[in-house]
Image: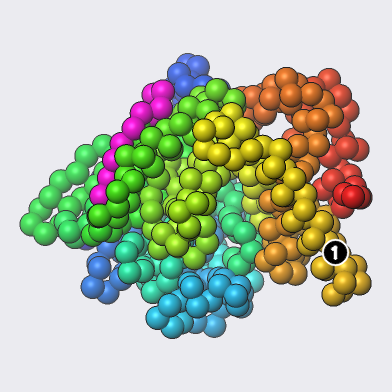
Amino acid sequence: MKTFANFLKKHKFKLLAAAVLIAIIVIIPFIFKPESKSQNYNSYFMDLNYNDQTHILSGSEGVEYFNNSENAFSSLYFHLYPNAFRQGSKSPVVSSNNFNDAFPNGESYGSINILKVCDENGLSLEFSIGGSDENILQVDLPEELYPDESVKIGIEFETILPNANHRFGYGENTINLGNFYPIACVYEDGKGFFTQAYHSNGDPFYSDVAFYTVDFSCSSNFTVAASGEAKSQQTNGQTTTYSYQGDKIRDFCIVLSEKFDTASSQAGDTTINYYGYQGDSDLQAMADFASQCVNTYNEMFGAYPYSTLNVVKSNFVHGGMEYPGIVLISDTVSEEDYQYVIAHEIAHQWWYGVVGTNEYDHAWIDEGLAEYSTYLFFENNEEFGLNYSSMISNALTNYKFFVQIYQQINGDVDTSMDRSLDQFGTEPEYVQCVYTKGVLLFDSLRESVGERKFLKALKDLYKDFAYQNISPAELIASFSSSTGRNLENFIKGWIEGKVVIA
């Protein structure tokens, strides 16, 4: 592992280069569609080394942080998601129903230790670990950071992985490095930094897009899939170092395994890599299916802006998980549902990846759009045997059954959609109100405004809010503008639980 001083020296020029690159992007139109509004993006530079004997990831992280707000900051805040896996954390990382699947070898713990924080010259900065559950790193700045200014800091950390079939952990077949590093909290004008802790419901994450330069070292026995574009790999003895570049991506994920076998396909300008297990007979079929998903979504919503998309079979307690440029598909998903999960997770590359949202407070936006996009995929690709009308009918039946059961048990049921993850009492309540009702909302909206206007609204949403985080109010305004209809009462009726679905 390089010394921290050498790391800062190595990346000092890169930080400057990134700033110059950002300035160029502001002046010269971005070559990919969709286009984004001009703003300064944060940059992350990481040197990572994974020890597969200790299951510890050693990391050095350089961050150039831009203040895009209207306020001055005396401190910056970073999420420490791995601390949700530590012993004594307040919120479980999975529901009790999923505990044994997540921890097949018994409960296991992980965490992240912050070893040092310094400025760009290597001088130590004061920091503390806080938040509601030791989930936030607070870095005190040597001087106030004013609007449109940037600051460069370095963070040295050590991440300990649990033995868990989760986004973050090592299992029998794969090692999943999701949400493993300090990532800057989103700042919202009028609200401040978003510092909510981890929750077992949904995807408790919220981040801005940024530039990533990542060097990842591990045993040469592993095959590695990651976010971003693979630039190079160098082997020195028993260790291989992989270099990645991710431009304007929302997060960074790495999955590695000694059991991977791969196949590739092409969708427009994007190479699709499918990582299955050795002995799988469907490698090329799954790569081609993923390619068909990307082609379909390209046509419906707008072009996928990245050169690589990795679809990765993995140990994962839930069906699948999305990250920029990489999606995880659980190796426990049944054969009949496997393609459905791939289609859903790939849809998230548009809804979450490019058009982001606060997944903690407004999960219905990205999950509802991704789930409905999955329905649209199968409607436009009938050869896979799923009928759109039947899927909508099943969703309606499932939702009505959920309401009926909850009313019988509790006497009442909260059917509102626009709630934070910790406000859903159970996982089924979250799934039905966010996914299933999300599908019914967008199907009803399509029926109300007509298919042509509805699909135009999706294209406009993707184009106009690329690389941003969209709020419910902005989504409503966007759909209203695109369709020429005031849809505020219509959509609010659904998300506030006022619509009665008979």
Residue 149 position by quadrant? top right
State whether the magenta stretch is mostly helix, strand or loop.
strand
Q: Amino acid at mark 1?
A: Gln
- Residue 68 in view of the camera: no
Q: Which residue is mark 1?
A: 404
**Frontmost residue, 38 versus 72:** 38
Query: Which one is nearer the viewer's eye here, 303 or 35?
Result: 303
Residue 461 in the image, given as x and y percentages of width and height:
67, 29
Q: Which residues are magenta?
A: 260-270
Q: Residue furthest top?
A: 28
- 66 relative to 175, above or below: above
At horizontal 36% and vertical 68% (from top left) the residue drawn is 170
User: What is the image's colouring?
Assistant: rainbow
Q: Is residue 12 left or right of residue 414?
A: left
Q: Quadrant of the N terminus?
A: bottom left
- Residue closest to the eye, 188 or 235: 235
Residue 24: % across, % down: 44, 22
Q: Number of numbered discs present? A: 1
Q: Is residue 269 magenta?
A: yes
Left or right of 203? Residue 28 is left
Magenta-drawn stretch contains 27 = no
User: Is 300 displayed left or right of 163 in the figure?
Assistant: right
Q: Residue furthest left?
A: 237
Q: Residues within 10 Å of mark 1 (few under 14, many from 20)?
A: some
Q: Is residue 135 left or right of residue 407?
A: left
